[in-house]
Image (cartoon, rainbow, N blue to C red):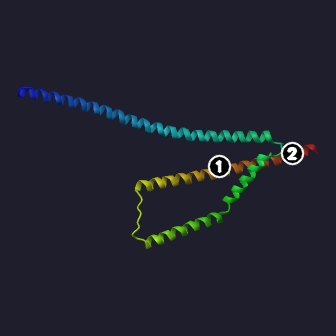
């Protein structure tokens, strides 16, 4: 490269290439933002379809329960069904006994107070929790709480279904007894 003309031509060529590269970067950036919007829409649709699947699964389960009640009407309760009923009754009684859980909660609270008291005594031993770790812990505890709430609702629904089955069986037993008489 000799002279200012060559230098000017090279500079113009580099500016032209820079503009082309910038145009290409802008196009790619637009494509990325469009893909991100599509991904957000797809994630929302997937969540909606999951909820719909859960609703439909629950409806199918309800239909199967009603069908099974009709199919089993007039038959005695089987041994495994009796075991399930006993287990559900046990779980229900545990859930209805709040003193047990209150006692455990009071015990945990007293342990926390003791740790806070000893923590104040030992001020040189300080522990810090990273904000991200704290957020993850909160998220994990929230998921656990949601899971427990869902489990409790499923158990309550199952207990209602069992009561409905027992009611259906007792009604069919009365009807069979009147037919045989």
> Residue at coordinates 45% horizontally, 70% vertically from top-left?
119
Say if residue 163 shows up in the picture: no
Circle 2 packing at 10 Å, graded few (<14), some (14-19), many (20+), is few
Instruction: Please identify the residue farthest to the right as the structure is shown.
Output: 181
Q: Residue 20's x, y, as percent?
A: 23, 29
* Residue 6 horizontal side relative to residue 133, left or right: left
Circle 1 packing at 10 Å, graded few (<14), some (14-19), many (20+), is few
Q: How many marks?
A: 2
Q: Residue 161's x, y, as percent?
A: 72, 48
Identify whether 105 is placed above or below 175: below
Q: Residue 70's x, y, as percent?
A: 78, 40
Q: Which mark is on residue 27?
A: none
Q: Secondary structure at mark 1?
A: helix
Identify whether 74 is placed above or below 108: above
Q: Which residue is mark 1?
A: 154
In front: label 1 or label 2? 1
* Residue 42 horizontal side relative to residue 93, left or right: left
Res. 128 image quadrant: bottom left
Q: Which residue is mark 2?
A: 175
Instruction: Please identify the residue farthest to the left as the structure is shown.
Output: 3
Q: Residue 111's x, y, as percent?
A: 54, 68
> Residue at coordinates 59% horizontally, 53% vertically from top-left?
148
Q: Are marks 1 and 2 in contact (CB under 8 Å)?
A: no
* Residue 82 horizontal side relative to residue 129, left or right: right
Say if residue 143 shows up in the picture: yes
Q: Secondary structure at mark 2?
A: helix
Identify whether 174 is placed above or below 99: above
- Between disc 1 and disc 2, whose residue precedes? 1
Instruction: Please identify the residue farthest to the bottom as the structure is shown.
Output: 121
Residue situated in front as seen by the camera: 164 or 104: 104
């Amino acid at each position: 490269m000799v002279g200012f003309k060559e230098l000017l031509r090279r500079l113009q060529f580099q500016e032209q290439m820079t503009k082309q590269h910038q145009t290409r970067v802008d196009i790619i950036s637009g494509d990325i933002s469009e893909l991100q919007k599509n991904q957000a829409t797809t994630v929302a649709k997937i969540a909606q379809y999951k909820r719909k699947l859960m609703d439909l699964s629950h409806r199918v389960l309800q239909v199967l329960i009603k069908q099974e009640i009709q199919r089993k009407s007039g038959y005695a309760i089987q041994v495994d069904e009796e075991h399930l009923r006993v287990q559900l009754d046990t779980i229900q009684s545990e859930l209805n006994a709040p003193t047990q859980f209150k006692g455990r909660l009071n015990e945990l609270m007293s342990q926390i107070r003791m740790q806070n008291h000893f923590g104040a005594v030992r001020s040189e031993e300080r522990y810090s929790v990273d904000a991200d770790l704290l957020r993850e812990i909160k998220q994990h505890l929230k998921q656990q709480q949601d899971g427990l709430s869902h489990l409790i609702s499923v158990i309550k629904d199952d207990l209602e279904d069992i009561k409905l089955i027992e009611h259906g069986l007792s009604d069919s037993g009365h009807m069979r007894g009147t037919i045989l008489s």
